[in-house]
Image: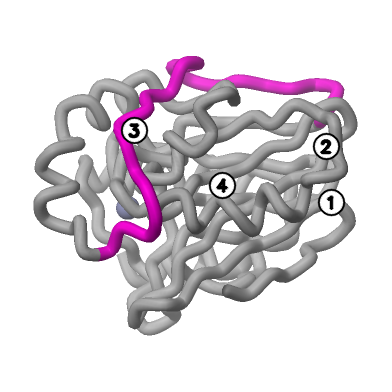
Amino acid sequence: MQQRKINNRGVLFTFDMFDWDLNMYLILGKKYNFLIDTGLGSLCIEPVMEYIKNQSKPLFVINTHYHWDHIWGNSSLKNCSIIAHKLCRDMIEKEWEVMMRKNGRFCYGNAEICLPDIVFDAEIYFPDEQIRIIHTPGHTIDSISVLDEKDRILYAGDNIGDTMDDILPSLNCERDAYLCTLMKYKELDFDLCLSGHNGILQKDVLDVISSKI
Ligand SMILES: [Zn+2]
C-alpha cells in the first residue's frame, strides 16, 4: 500500500496487491474529513483509520459508484454517513450478490452490504469545506465526482481509464452522457485529476481522452 500526500489536505491511498492499482482518497477538511471510496473491504479501511486516529472530526464517506472495488469497505464505516448518487444505492442493493459471487476472490478483509444513507440527484455542496460532489455519468450512470475547490483537485472516480494506455474508461451509459461529463470537467477549476485506478494526472488528460473518444 502506498500513501501519498496531495497538495495541502489530501492523502491518496493506493493498493496494489493485485495486478491493478486501486485508489481511495482522504480529504482533511475543516470541520469534517471525507473519504472517497472504501476499496475491497475492512483491510483497506485500516490504514485510513490509523491516519486519522487522533482526529475528532466526523468522517463523511463518499462512494463514487456502485462497483464492488469502491464499496466493499462500507461496512467497516457503519457509523459514518455514506454519500452517493441515488442510483448508486439502488444498484448496490441489486448487484451486491452478483458482484460478490463474481469477484469475491478480491475481497480484502470483511465486506458486508452497507448502503449509502445520504443520496442526491445532481449535486451536494459543502460550502465551508469547499467540496463539491457532482453527478457525472459515464463509466456508470451513477458515477459521481468530487471537486476539492480549495486544493484544486478533481477526483473523477472511474471516469478516467485505469492506465495511460487505456485512458478511455469502459462506458456503461450513453456516450453523449460521458461527453457531457467531459465538458463539465473542463469547465471546473482544478489542476490535478485523481481517479479510481490511475495515477496523479494533470487536467490536460481530459484533452487526451477527448481525442480518443
Ligand atoms: Zn468501476
The response on whether ligand 1 sits within 8 Å of label 3 is no
Marks 2,1: beta carbons within 8 A: yes
Of the 4 image quadrants, the one containing the C terminus is: bottom left
Regarding mark 3 in the picture, which secondary structure is present there? loop
In the picture of the structure, the residue carrying the numbered disc 3 is: 142
Give the residue at x 22% y 42%: 173
Estimate the x, y position of residue 207 in percent, counting from the top left: 51, 67
Q: Nearer the viewer, residue 131 or 104?
A: 104
Q: Earlier in the sequence, mark 2 or mark 3?
A: 2
Does label 2 or label 1 sit earlier along the sequence?
Answer: 1
Q: CA distance from mark 3 to mark 1?
A: 26 Å
Residue 65 at x, y percent in the picture: 38, 40
Closer to the chain start, of discs 3 and 1, is: 1
Question: Which dot, 3 or 4, sits closer to the camera?
Answer: 3
Label 2 and label 3: CA atoms lie apart by 25 Å
> On residue 29, which mark appears?
2
Q: The magenta stretch spans which residues?
A: 106-129
Work out whether 4 lies above or below 65: below
Please tell me how crowded label 4 is: few (under 14), some (14-19), or many (20+) other residues with Cα within 10 Å: some
Question: Helix, strand, or loop for circle 1?
Answer: loop
What's the CA distance linking mark 2 and mark 1?
7 Å
Q: Earlier in the sequence, mark 2 or mark 4?
A: 2
